[in-house]
């Protein structure tokens, strides 16, 4: 146990029963590179956690620590209440059965059939042939590949290969599924299908999923919570709807730039910093009031606000709006408009004037 950690901190670090993973101050260094600089993180049973960050941020190292492929220099990695950080290789074997792994490039054995690939973890674990066959059939049914049991990987599409990868990862009934860029090599339509499958597995089997990805769409589509990592540290985390609606760090804003609406360049180019007749305002709102905003602004200010750009998305069942509005700026109109926006708990920013 770390001597320098204060008692209050230690008490807070005891994983509640609802947590399947708890990391406490996990550090890993490669020479001069600090890949993980003190990661503390809990993963609740049954949730889907997305981990995002730039290239080199430490995502792969983190996920490799979770399946015992990488050892931290210090810190605790508890899986189902057991600290695996100091376990010897032989002691890690039972853990590996509790943790399934899905890879970007599928990692299938080319000389083995689909059924053999899926059954491999069970064979390694010494399960009898008949039992294996039953489980493999069940898994291929689950991922919609029953008719491909005797095919070889080369005869499959990318999406089908990933279905095999997912079936293999689930073979030993893991409690935790780790996904390392599982959809990065797939086209958008196949990505949607694989994400739907992962979500279905999560909901139907209750398998907790931790996924790392550079695709924000993946996080928006299936994750419950997201952690943003930079230089081996978590810089922001929270429910996906909140982090996507109100990113708190510049890094998160920049990672989300591709999927959060931005003011079109031609409008941005016409903005002046000096107050003018109209203010161009960015309003980020969460909740039901977003749809009636323009009418409410007109009622409050007696003037019409114009929607220039943006829209309302649904994230985790919540309306999340990013709107660019042109609001009359004379007299009290702008202040009144801001009061209406503030009353909805959103954030507003005057970008300039036209
Ligand atoms: N085995 C290793 N030996 C030396 N340096 C390593 C090793 N593994 C990772 N690193 C370094 O640690 C840092 C974190 O790497 P990591 O692969 O975890 O990042 P990442 O966020 O997964 O990046 P990417 O998205 O590009 O895969 C990087 O600077 C990387 O070069």
Image (cartoon, rainbow, N blue to C red):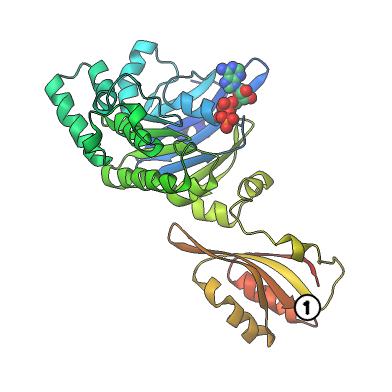
Residue sitting at 68 percent across and 17 percent down?
32
Q: Which quadrant does the C terminus fall into?
A: bottom right
Q: Pick the residue in front: 220 or 229.
A: 220
In this view, the residue farthest toward the right is 274
Q: Give the image quarter of residue 80.
A: top left
Using residue 318 as the reference point, say whether residue 248 is left or right of it: right
Using residue 171 as the reference point, say whether residue 176 is left or right of it: right
Q: Pick the residue in front: 19 or 128.
A: 128
Mark 1 crowdedness (10 Å alpha carbons): few <14, some 14-19, many ≥20: some
Q: Give the image quarter of residue 304.
A: bottom right
The residue to which callout 1 is attached is 329
Instruction: Residue 343 in the image: state x and y as whole percent.
Output: 60, 72
Give ligand 1's quarter of the image. top right
Instruction: Residue 328 in the image: state x and y as whole percent.
Output: 75, 80
Using residue 58 as the reference point, say whether residue 350 is left or right of it: right
Secondary structure, mark 1, is loop
Residue sitting at 26 percent across and 31 percent down?
173
Looking at the picture, does residue 252 appear above or below residue 169?
A: below
Q: Pick the residue in front: 188 or 289.
A: 188
Q: Is residue 35 visible?
A: no
Looking at the picture, does residue 144 appear above or below residue 76?
A: below
Residue sitting at 51 percent across and 55 percent down?
241
């Amino acid at each position: 146990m770390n001597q320098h950690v204060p008692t209050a901190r230690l008490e807070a670090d005891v994983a509640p029963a609802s947590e399947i993973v708890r990391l406490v101050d996990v550090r890993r260094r490669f020479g001069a590179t600090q890949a993980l600089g003190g990661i503390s993180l809990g993963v609740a049973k049954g949730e889907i956690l997305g981990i995002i960050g730039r290239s080199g941020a430490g995502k792969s190292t983190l996920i490799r620590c979770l399946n015992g492929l990488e050892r931290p220099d210090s810190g605790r990695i508890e899986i189902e209440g057991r600290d695996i950080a100091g376990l010897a290789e032989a002691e890690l074997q039972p853990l590996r059965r509790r943790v399934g792994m899905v890879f970007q490039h599928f990692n299938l054995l080319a000389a083995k059939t689909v059924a053999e690939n899926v059954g491999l973890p069970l064979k390694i674990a010494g399960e009898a042939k008949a039992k294996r066959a039953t489980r493999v059939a069940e898994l291929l049914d689950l991922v919609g590949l029953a008719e491909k049991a005797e095919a070889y990987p080369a005869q499959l599409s990318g999406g089908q290969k990933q279905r095999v990868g997912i079936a293999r990862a689930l073979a030993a009934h893991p409690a935790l599924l780790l996904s390392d860029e599982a959809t990065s090599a797939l086209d958008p339509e196949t990505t949607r299908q694989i994400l739907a499958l992962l979500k279905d597995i999560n909901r139907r089997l209750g398998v907790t999923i931790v996924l790392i990805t550079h695709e924000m769409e993946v996080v928006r589509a299936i994750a419950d919570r997201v952690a943003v990592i930079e230089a081996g540290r978590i810089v922001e985390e929270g429910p996906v709807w909140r982090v996507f609606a109100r990113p708190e760090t510049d890094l998160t804003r920049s990672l989300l730039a591709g999927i959060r609406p931005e003011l079109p360049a031609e409008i941005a180019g016409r903005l002046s910093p000096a107050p003018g007749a109209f203010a161009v305002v960015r309003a980020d709102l969460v909740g039901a009031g977003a749809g009636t905003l323009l009418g409410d602004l007109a009622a409050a200010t007696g003037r019409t606000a114009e929607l220039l750009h943006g829209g309302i998305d649904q994230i985790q069942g919540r309306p999340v709006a990013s709107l660019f509005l042109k609001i009359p700026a004379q007299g009290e109109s702008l202040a009144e408009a801001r009061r209406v926006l503030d009353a909805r708990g959103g954030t507003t920013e005057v970008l300039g004037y036209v």
